[in-house]
Image (tube, grey):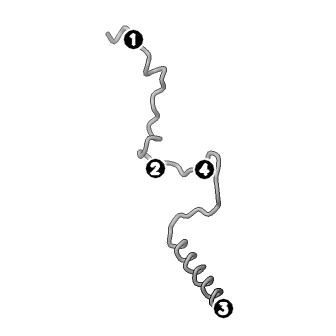
Amino acid sequence: MWKLLVAFAVFAALALFILSKGGDIDMSGEKHGIDAHPPAASGAGHAATPAPDAASAAAPAPAASK
């Protein structure tokens, strides 16, 4: 029985050590809403440049540009 307690204590200490060295680990559970994801880095990813909407992409060129 004492071996089980020692093994649990060693495993718990190892788990805490690994989690403390892991960096930014969020153990608060599921998140929903606006603050669910961290903001994207500036200039990186597709969130920095919005895609053109379908109405402006399908619109014909104005007569002045011909």
User: Residue at the location (45% across, 28% down)?
Assistant: 52
Amino acid under label 4? Ala
Amino acid under label 3? Trp
Q: Nearer the viewer, mark 2 or mark 4?
A: 4
Q: Residues within 10 Å of mark 4 (few under 14, many from 20)?
A: few
Residue 38 location (% of width, % of height) = 54, 52
Q: Nearer the viewer, mark 1 or mark 3?
A: 3
Residue on which the image places disc 2: 41
Amino acid under label 1? Pro
Q: CA distance from mark 1 to mark 4?
A: 43 Å
Q: Residues within 10 Å of mark 2 (few under 14, many from 20)?
A: few
Q: Residue furthest right?
A: 1
Report the front residue among 32 and 1: 1
Q: Residue furthest front?
A: 1
Position of residue 54 in the picture relative to residue 36 (left or right) = left
Q: Secondary structure at mark 2?
A: loop
Give the mark, 2 or 3, whose residue is nearer the N terminus: 3
For residue 2, the mark is 3
Residue on which the image places disc 1: 62
Report the front residue among 10 and 27: 10
Residue on which the image places disc 4: 36
User: Residue at the location (60% across, 85% down)?
Assistant: 7
Above or below 9: residue 35 = above
Residue 66 location (% of width, % of height) = 31, 9
Res 43 → quadrant: top left
